[in-house]
Image: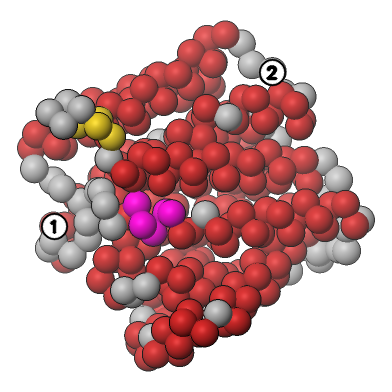
Amino acid sequence: MYVLIAFLTPFLHALSCILDAHFSNNIFKKIPSLVFYATISNIVIIPFLFFFGMPVVPSLDILAVLFIIALIEVCYQIPYYHALRNIDTSIVVALFALGEITLPILAYFIVGEKLHLAQYIGFGIILLSTFGLNFDSKKFKLNIAFVLMLLVSVLLSLSAVLSKYSLQSVDFVTVVFWIALFATLISLFLLIVPQYRSDIISTFPQYKKKIKLFLSNELLNQAGSLAATIALAYLPVLVVEAVGSSQSIFTLLLGFVLYKIFGNRFKENLARHDVIKKIISFTLIIIGIYMVLR
C-alpha cells in the first residue's frame, strides 16, 4: 500500500514539472520572480492539512531542521528552473536521480539506514542511465543541466533525509505545515533586493493571469510531496527516492499526451531517435528501481 502511495509522488510531480517548464520557458524571463511566485503559492496547501490533523509546535531543534528543509525547498528552484531552459523536461526530471550519489551516505549517517549490495547496485544503474542521457559523445562533454541538477539532487536528497529525521519526532501534518510556512516567509526576502523586487512587481499581472495554473501546479506539487512524506514515515528513504526516479517515465508519457492535445507548447523533444534513447535509459532506471525495492 505504501509503495503505491510513494508512486503517487512521481506521477503528480511529473505533471508539476511539465507546468514548471512552461512557466520557466514561456512566462517568466527572470527566475527569481518565478521562484517567488511559485513559493508563495504553496500557502494554498495549509488549509487542506487540517483534514489530516492539527499541526503542533515542535521542539526548537526540530523547528531548525524544518527551517533548513524549507530553505532548501526555496533555493533548489533556481538551478532547477535554469536546467529546464537547457534540456528536455523528462531528462531534467531523470537527473533528479543524481542525488543517489550522496543519499546512501546521508541516510546511513543521519538515520542509520542500511540496504543490501544489490540495492546499491540498483542506484548505480539509475545514476549511469542519467549520465548517458546527458553526455554528448561528439563534443565529449556533459550538458550544463547535468551540473545544475546534480546540485538540485544533492539538496533534495538532504531534504529527504532531514524530513525522515523530523518524522521520527513529529507527524507528517506538522512537518508539511512548518515547511510550507517557512518557505513562504523565506521567499519574501527576495523583495529586499531592489532588482528582484522591481521584476516581481512588474510580473504580477502575468502571475495574476495564470494564478489558477499556479495554484493547480502547487496542489500537484504539494500532493506529491505529501504522498512522499507519508511514504517516508513507513518506508526507507532510499526506497522512496528510488520510486521517485520513475518520474522521468511519467513525464515523457504525459508530455506525449499533452503534445497530442495542445501541440508543441511544452519543452519535450519527441523525435523518434530521442524518444528511443530516453525509453532505453528510463527502462534501465526502472530496473534500478526494481533492484532497490527487492
Pointer 1 or 2: first along the chain = 2
| Extreme residue in the top direction | 117
Kindly report the distance in space between the C-alpha atoms of the residues bearing marks 1 and 2.
Answer: 44 Å
Left or right side of 137 for 273: left
Number of the label disc, if any, that sits on residue 114: 2
Q: Are marks 1 and 2 in contact (CB under 8 Å)?
A: no
| Extreme residue in the left direction | 272
Q: Which residues are magenta?
A: 79-83
Amino acid, disc 1: Lys
Left or right side of 133 for 287: right
Left or right side of 186 for 215: left
**Secondary structure under the numbered disc 1 in the rendered image:** helix
Near mark 2 (Cα within 10 A), the count class, few <14, some 14-19 or many ≥20, is some
Q: Where does residue 209 sit, x and y in percent of width and height?
A: 35, 87
Which one is closest to the eye, mark 1 or mark 2?
2
Instruction: Please name whichever residue, 239 or 103, is drawn nearer the observer in this view of the structure.
Output: 103
User: Dividing the picture into quarters, in which one does residue 200 lie?
Assistant: bottom left
Tell me what residue is drawn at x 16 percent, y 57 percent. 259
Tell me what residue is drawn at x 64 percent, y 41 percent. 158
| Extreme residue in the right direction | 59
Tell me what residue is drawn at x 25 percent, y 32 percent. 141
Magenta stretch containing residue 96, yes or no? no
User: Dividing the picture into quarters, in which one does residue 192 lie?
Assistant: bottom right
Instruction: Please name whichever residue, 107 or 144, is drawn nearer the observer in this view of the structure.
Output: 144
Tell me what residue is drawn at x 43 percent, y 54 percent. 79
Against 269, is 242 above or below? above
Amino acid, disc 2: Lys
Residue 51 visible here: no
**Secondary structure under the numbered disc 2 in the rendered image:** loop
Residue 245 visible here: yes
Number of the label disc, if any, that sits on residue 260: 1
Q: Where does residue 293 sit, x and y in percent of width and height?
A: 53, 22
